[in-house]
Structures are given as C-alpha cells and as structure tokens.
C-alpha cells in the first residue's frame, strides 16, 4: 500500500520521557498526541520505515545495515533514566540494499554502516508513535555540506519505496535556532518561517523543489536555521513526494517557537 512521506519535529532530547522543567510541564504534550495518532492516519501498516535524522551527517548518503541496531544516546544533561530508554525495532538489511540500489540508479554514490544504531532523532519520536517497535527500520544519513538540492534529489531517487509500503520519515525541527529558543525572537522568526513553509509545501513538485532549495532566502529562514541540519530531512521527504502536494498536519508552540509537521501524499 502506497505510503505518504512525513517530516516530523522530534522535540528536544528525550523530552517525551521525562518531567520537562524548561518551561510548562505540558510543553511537548500536543506534539506527543500528534505522534501517537500518526499510525492511524496512514493508509495502512508500513512494511518498513526509512528515517532521515538531523543527527547523522556523512560524506555521502549512508544507510544502517545492522539487523538489530542499538540506540545512540546522543544527548547530554538529561535525567539518568533517559539513557536507559529502549526501542528495539529490527533493522532491515534488504531495505538498506534497496536504498543503495535506487541511489545508484540515480547516479548518487552511497555507503553503508553495519555498526551505527538509531540516534535520538529516530528512537525518541518513534517510541511515542510506534511503541511496539515491531516495524523494520533503516536510518539514512544526511550528506555533509547540507546542500538542499542534493537532498531533494536523494528523495526523488527513493520515491519508489513508497509503492513498496515503506514510510519515508524526515526527522528534524521546523525551527532550530538554539540561541533563539525561550526568547521573543523565537516566536517572531518561527511564525514568519512557518507561514512561508506552509505556503511552499502545497506547491507542485518542481515549483516546491525550487522554493525549498532557496529556503535561506525565505522570511526568517536563516534566523530560524543558523545551521540547516534540522531542516534538511524535510528536503528528502519533499523530494520523495514527487508531484504530490504537502500540507502542515501539526502545529504547536514549544520553547517559545512554532513547530510544524508536514505530510506529503
């Protein structure tokens, strides 16, 4: 069953699994509720997940190939119990090989990593959305240099996976200015950029791709993403959408900023 593609905000560290003290205790409740409802919004159970996280960059697109990937607790300063979280989703070496095949057919060199586990951009939001951890999952890296056009092309190459029932997920944040959170600037900049994003994702494929490739020229674009690694997973999800329109499917306020999730197809 053909799956959509999703760009989701993965929150702050292990935010869903701790008492949040940096602001209201229910800061992440709206996002958690949306994540919990994500599976029921899909056309059917995915055969597998391909997740692009903001927290892995490599010289070329790289896939995990472990049959049972561990978790990477790549956050610091959080309560001890958050370093004992579990999310034992199996890997999918066959899907990893298919990803590399599709990239090669598009003229995009790739690599694989048999040891890397799921970073928190994968296991934190998916532990909320899919707590049973029973769907095979492969993580795909970003490419160093963070060229938006390159990541859109990677997404286009991977679009056939959707017809195999694979759910392609970009995990990042629609606003990620670390020195802006908790300030009035976060509200102003994130609202401006979010309004632009909502207008762009509904555009037709080539027009949308051209707009996304120029994201830094958007209102408050660079102010919202001083470094764009948390935005680039959106490019892969948008590229894999082809001509299908996107739409904002979740919007909430966290740490003073507007954050959004986008669905294509």
Image (tube, helix red, strand yellow):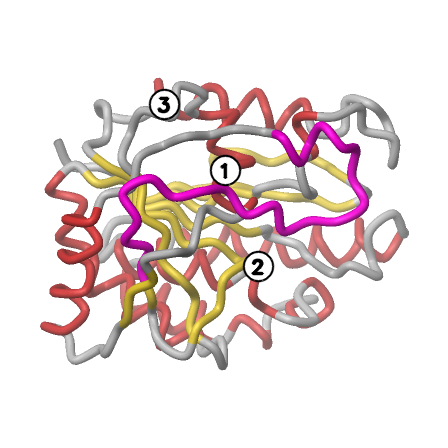
| Residue 55 horizontal/vertical position (percent) | 55, 58
| Residue 104 horizontal/vertical position (percent) | 14, 73
Q: CA distance from mark 2 to mark 1?
A: 16 Å
Residue with the mark numbered 3: 39
- Residues shaded magenta: 63-84
Kindly indicate the quadrant of the structure image that contains residue 77. Answer: top right
- Name above or below for residue 199 compared with residue 219: above
| Residue 133 horizontal/vertical position (percent) | 38, 26
Residue with the mark numbered 2: 230
Compare marks 3 and 2 and give the one earlier in the sequence: 3
Residue with the mark numbered 1: 123
Q: Residue at point 42% right, 24% down? A: 130
Is the Cβ of the residue at disc 3 closer than 8 Å to that at disc 1?
no
The answer to if 134 sits in the magenta stretch is no
- Name above or below for residue 76 compared with residue 132: below
Give the camera-side residue of 164 and 189: 164
């Amino acid at each position: 069953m053909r799956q959509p593609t999703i760009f989701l905000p993965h929150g702050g560290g292990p935010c869903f699994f701790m008492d949040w003290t940096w602001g209201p205790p229910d800061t992440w409740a709206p996002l958690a509720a949306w994540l919990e409802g994500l599976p029921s919004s899909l056309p059917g159970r995915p055969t597998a997940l391909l997740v692009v996280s903001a927290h892995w960059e490599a010289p070329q697109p790289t896939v995990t190939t472990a049959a049972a990937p561990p978790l990477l607790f790549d956050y610091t300063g959080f309560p001890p119990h958050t370093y004992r979280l579990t999310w034992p989703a199996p890997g999918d070496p066959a899907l990893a090989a298919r990803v590399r095949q599709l990239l090669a057919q598009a003229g995009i060199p790739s690599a694989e990593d048999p040891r890397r586990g799921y970073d928190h951009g994968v296991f934190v939001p998916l532990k909320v959305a899919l707590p049973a951890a029973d769907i095979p999952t492969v993580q795909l890296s970003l490419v160093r240099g963070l060229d938006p056009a390159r990541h859109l092309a990677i997404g286009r190459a991977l679009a056939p996976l959707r017809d195999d029932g694979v759910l392609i997920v970009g995990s990042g944040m629609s606003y990620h200015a670390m020195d802006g959170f908790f300030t009035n600037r976060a509200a102003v900049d994130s609202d401006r950029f979010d309004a632009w994003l909502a207008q762009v994702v509904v555009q037709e494929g080539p027009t949308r791709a051209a707009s996304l490739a120029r994201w830094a020229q958007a209102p408050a674009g660079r102010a919202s993403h001083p470094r764009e690694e948390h935005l680039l997973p959106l490019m892969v999800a948008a590229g894999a959408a082809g001509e299908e329109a996107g739409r904002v499917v979740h919007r909430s306020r966290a740490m003073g900023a507007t954050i959004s999730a986008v669905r294509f197809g």
